Amino acid sequence: MDVPIIEKVVAQMKNLPQELQWRVWEFTRTLAVTTPQGTSGVQLLRFAGSIPRDDVKVMKEAIEQGCEQVDGNEW
């Protein structure tokens, strides 16, 4: 039987120094108060097909040219 995720997290935290335990606690607290925002896919369906195919092709090409390259010196 699988161990619940919370038990796995607690087991890992027991091995961390107290400073890192605090960081994990702060992170989980932040996650708990963060509400995901956005629009459901169902609500977006009304926009399906509203962008002309030629424009979609231009956008796709721009993404492929500009976004699929890695600049090793960027970071």
Image (spheres, helix red, strand yellow):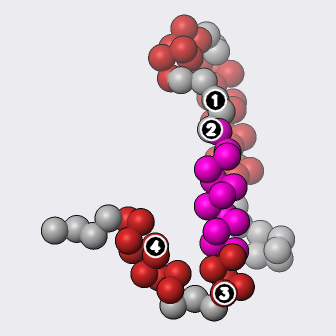
- The reply to whether discs 1 and 2 touch (Cβ–Cβ < 8 Å) is yes
| Disc on res. 8 | none
Q: What's the amino acid at mark 3? A: Gln
**Image quarter of the N terminus:** bottom left
In the image, 72 versus 23, the foreground residue is: 23
| Disc on res. 9 | 4
As for residue 65 lying within the magenta part, the answer is: no
- The reply to whether discs 3 and 2 touch (Cβ–Cβ < 8 Å) is no
Q: Which callout, 4 or 2, points at the residue further toward the start of the chain?
A: 4
Label 1 and label 2: CA atoms lie apart by 7 Å
Q: Residue at x 38, y 65 (%)?
A: 5
Q: What's the amino acid at mark 4? A: Val
User: Which residue has dot 2 on it?
Assistant: 36
**43 is higher (above) or lower (below) than 10:** above
Label 4 and label 3: CA atoms lie apart by 14 Å
- Report the magenta stretch's main SS: helix
User: Which residue has dot 3 on it?
Assistant: 18
Q: Is residue 48 visible?
A: no
Label 4 and label 1: CA atoms lie apart by 29 Å
What secondary structure is found at the residue carrying circle 3? helix
